[in-house]
């Protein structure tokens, strides 16, 4: 595990309570459990990209919001705050926080569905990690949609006030992730040959952790 300078409360601009919440999340497993217990952010009032502070206050998040909380907690404990961006066709992108143990990559993920969740640190490369999401990454027509993964984005490149404490959205981070170099996972011919998920997979994939209140 690579040790770096730990992020202090003063450096991040967090309150004592906010910082204490993240400091208690001492391992990737504890961070993941914390994200699982956050309500899903269904963006009922429009698209959001909440900062760490807003997520801690509202206790709800979607993928990029959960990933930034995870990365911030990792940084507090002396690990690099790295995000990985997945891009898809005819589907939503997905963002995870990545970490290493014994030279292997793992991922912390906030998602409402089954497939795009936590990954144990057993992957030799980020490409291997990204490929582990391929089969479960599909759209409403049950087509597998994952196509690229990004170079790890180090959040130390951004001022904390743009993603840790911002009240009006961490939109600069969204742009930075989109602009980060991405790598293709397959050729166009391989993508055309991907099999749709079968009916049994579809039934399992429709299970959600939190129900959208607009659909109750």
Image (spheres, rainbow, N blue to C red):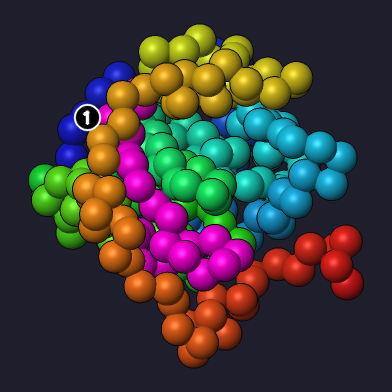
Residue 144 on the magenta segment: yes
Write the residue at 75% across / 20% down: 167
Instruction: Relative to 185, say whether 36 is above or below.
Output: below
Secondary structure mainly formed by the magenta segment? loop
Q: Secondary structure at mark 1?
A: loop
Q: How many marks?
A: 1
Residue 146 on image: x %, y %? 39, 52
Looking at the image, which residue sits at the far top?
Answer: 159
Front in this rendered view, residue 95 or 119: 95
Res 104 seen here: no
What residue is disc 1 on? 3
- Whole-percent x and y of residue 110? 54, 53
Q: Nearer the viewer, residue 103 or 138?
A: 138
Side (left or right) of 63 relative to 58: left
26 vs 211, nearest the viewer: 211
Quadrant where the C terminus is found in the figure: bottom right
Left or right: where does residue 104 sit relative to residue 66? left
Left or right of residue 68, residue 2 in this image: left
Counting from the top left corner in percent of width and height, residue 75 is at 39, 29
Above or below, comparing residue 93 to residue 48 in the picture: below
* Quarter of the picture holding the N terminus: top left
- Span shown in magenta: 133-154
């Amino acid at each position: 595990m690579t040790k770096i300078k730990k992020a202090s409360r003063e450096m991040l601009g967090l309150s004592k309570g906010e910082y204490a919440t993240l400091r208690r999340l001492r391992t990737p497993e504890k961070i993941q459990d914390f994200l699982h217990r956050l309500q899903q952010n269904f963006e009922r009032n429009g698209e959001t990209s909440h900062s760490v502070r807003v997520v801690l206050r509202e206790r709800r998040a979607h993928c990029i919001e959960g990933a930034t909380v995870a990365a911030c907690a990792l940084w507090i404990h002396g690990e690099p705050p790295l995000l990985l961006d997945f891009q898809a066709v005819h589907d939503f992108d997905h963002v995870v926080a990545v970490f290493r143990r014994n030279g292997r990559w793992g991922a912390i993920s906030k998602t409402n569905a089954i497939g795009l969740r936590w990954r144990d640190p057993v992957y030799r490369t980020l490409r291997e990690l990204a490929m582990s999401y391929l089969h479960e990454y599909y759209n409403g027509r049950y087509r597998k949609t994952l196509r690229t993964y990004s170079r790890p984005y180090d959040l130390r490149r951004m001022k904390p006030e743009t993603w840790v404490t911002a009240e009006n959205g961490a939109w600069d981070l969204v742009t930075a992730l989109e602009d980060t170099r991405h790598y293709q996972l397959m050729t166009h011919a391989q993508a055309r040959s991907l099999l749709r998920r079968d009916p049994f997979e579809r039934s399992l994939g429709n299970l959600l952790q939190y129900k959208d209140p607009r659909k109750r």
